[in-house]
Amino acid sequence: MTRRPLRFPPALVLGMVMLLGAGDGLAGTLEITGPAGAEVFVNDQLVGILPLEGPLGAAPGEYEVRSDWPGHVPFREIVRVFSETEVIRVNIRLLPLNKGTAWRSSILYAGLGQFYLGHRTRGWIYAGVETAGLLTALVAELERSNLRQDYLVITDNYNSAINADEIERLRSDAEQAYDDMEQAEKLRNTGLYVAGGAIVVSVIDALISFPNLEAGPGTVPLQTGFLNLGGSPDGLTSAHLGVRMGF
């Protein structure tokens, strides 16, 4: 005898889906909306791409809702669920980045444009290079100023000296002070060139790496049933339930 597969009435299957999705009914609800195609993260875990198929069940606790989209300022919002019956609505607003703001920020200080665009590693590098260049230039300029004062004192003494040996010694000291002053000046200029170069590179990088705006719904993954954010306020679990029904 050929055994036929069990077939359940549609109403029964749908009821099983709702029961499995809703769990024990002790979770609050997060309703997240926003532009189609944007990825949604809750506590650094991807829960889907907008528009989500349904709400997220969340145990009482604190959650960070995050969304990133190329060409837009990243969205961050902290939400707190205090009770199992609470419904929290989060509307994700992604503001477009401005290219002018990016490169002008880099002119103000190297790396600021990269921080604005979310490229923090390159931002720290450019900012560090400019800072090092400026500090080098400052120290070298202070040293040059001190050497100049010494040079002027030695020159005055040289002009008033009458002893031949003293004149020779003061002339040698003046030449050495002048050479040291020139070296300090070169080091100061090098520091300024390095700082200026960091600004130029940061501006060019901000212009080249500025993300293109993306529009449209993109690929929306299949999401069925009730997404659940687990029982721990610090953790996140999502249950994706798909049922194939044949009649």
Image (cartoon, helix red, strand yellow):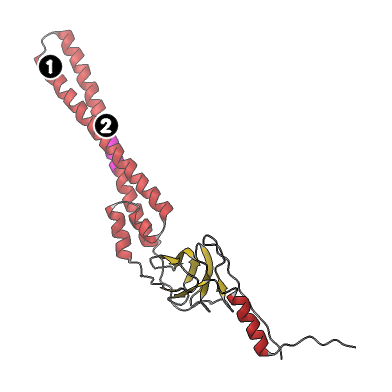
Q: Name the residue under label 1.
A: 157
Snapshot quadrant of residue 135: top left
- Residue 109 appears left or right of 4: left
Where 190 sits versus 26, above or below? above
Q: Is mark 2 on a helix, strand or loop?
A: helix
Residue labelled with disc 2: 184
SS assignment at label 1: helix
Q: Residue furthest right?
A: 1
The secondary structure that dominates the magenta segment is helix
At a point 28% along the width and 54% down the height, the residue shown is 107
Residue name at image x 34 percent, y 57 percent: 113
Ranked by sequence position, the earlier of labels 2 and 1 is 1
140 shown above or below 101 = above
Horizontal and vertical percent position of residue 126: 37, 49
Give residue 71's position: percent from left, percent from top.
40, 68
Name the spot of residue 23 as percent of width and height, x first. Answer: 60, 74
